[in-house]
Image: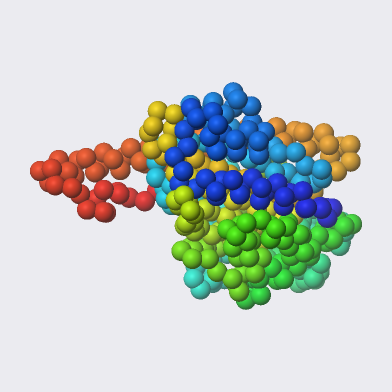
Amino acid sequence: MRVADTKLFAIVLWRVLLPAWALAGAPCVFGQTNGALHNFFRRQIGLGEDQIAAIGRGAAVARVLSSERPAEMVIFGAVFIHAEPQAYVRFAFDFERLRRLPAYHGVNRVSEPPSLRDFEGFVLEPGDLKDLRSCRPGKCSIQLPAEAMRELQTAVDWSDENAAAARINRRLQTLAFDVLQRYRAEGNTALGTYRDSAQPFDVNRELRTLLGRAEVLPVYIPELTRYLLEYPNASLPRLDSTFYWEKVSFGLKPTLRLNHAAAFHFEGPRGAAEVVAVKQLYASHYFQLALEITECIPARDAAGKPGFHLISLRGSTQQGLTGWKGAILRRIIAGRTRSAQEKALLEIKRMLEAGHAGRQDVSATTVSQDDGRPAGRSGGRGASL
């Protein structure tokens, strides 16, 4: 694993998001050639006219943004959805839905206050357990702080594999619980340093490098930067946050991840937007650092129908993408990731629009049954996604 210089990533991340926030609530129509949203896609992201037109027709478009550092991967995605922006916030926090997805081997929302029982199922794969036995700082297939690596290795009797696996997983759950508790109390300084490769990766330092560049931008952006950097000593108005862990396959080894998710309602001079941010606290493989920010910007499509643009930016630093072999692997991963992002956006669009249509049907039925009297808030909204 190599320490990535995240300066470019930070500049790209915040310059991409800034125009989106500035557009919050603006009625953007793709037919307006000189419209602000068109300029955003064209100038900030580098989309072609055909791609911009495709978004206007309801297609999902994803693009791997250029980077000077091979370990960085920044994925932009956009799709127009005929639904309320709040529907995506409900969708993003629907962990029962995640459990049903084929790529997920496990997921759980951490309770408030957190409990060690929340981490049942947070376990390593058999191959990871085998690798852990021979792990050394600087040479390990599992991302772990050096002190955790030593602790897991010395805490068990390796002569009994089943007993060793059970004890290691129990200890891993305790370590994850402790990391979360320290993070809740101390913030990013609790995230430690990975030493699974020759180049140690200080998560807190790299996140500060990643987000610290945003202070040169206008007033709205530093509020989010400050929250992500200074948690728990910073807050945002109308904020909902939670913690969850997941065990998910990205095409290779199943990976354990612990995340901090936050959703807040943003008020801008032209209107409002819903924003969801997910910051990775730990990953057992691949991702040294990961941050995803999704914005739901109210708008109308080319036909004038209301909905919102879902604009997503996912950034990460990953191991194994340097050197000539890494360059080949990066091209493969970039292509697959872009394709997967477009498919994911279309699936989100399908589910949210189906839910929106269902709520409209419920509302119409309720009005009919009430002899034309308008339905109340709960009747008109229907069930949450």
On screen, residue 104 above or below 225: above
**Which residue appears farthest toward the bottom when viewing the image?**
185
Above or below: residue 372 compared with residue 3: above
Residue plotted at (67% across, 33% down): 46
Locate residue 371: give its quadrant: top left
**Can you give x and y, in whole percent of width and height, for residue 348 in the image?**
48, 40
Query: What residue appears at the point 76 percent right and 59 percent down from the top-left corner?
Result: 209
Residue 325: image quadrant is top right
Residue appearing at x 44%, y 40% in the figure: 27
- Location of residue 251 in the rendering, given as x and y in whole percent from the top left corner: 67, 40
Q: Residue furthest top?
A: 50
Report the front residue among 349 and 248.
349
Residue 125 seen in render: no
Viewer-closest of 41 and 315? 41
Left or right placement of residue 34 versus residue 351 in this view: right
Residue 259 located left or right of residue 360? right
**x and y percentages locating residue 219 in the rendered image:** 60, 60
Up the image or down, 30 lies above or below 293; here it is above
Horizontal arrangement in the rendering, residue 361 relative to residue 285 (left or right): left
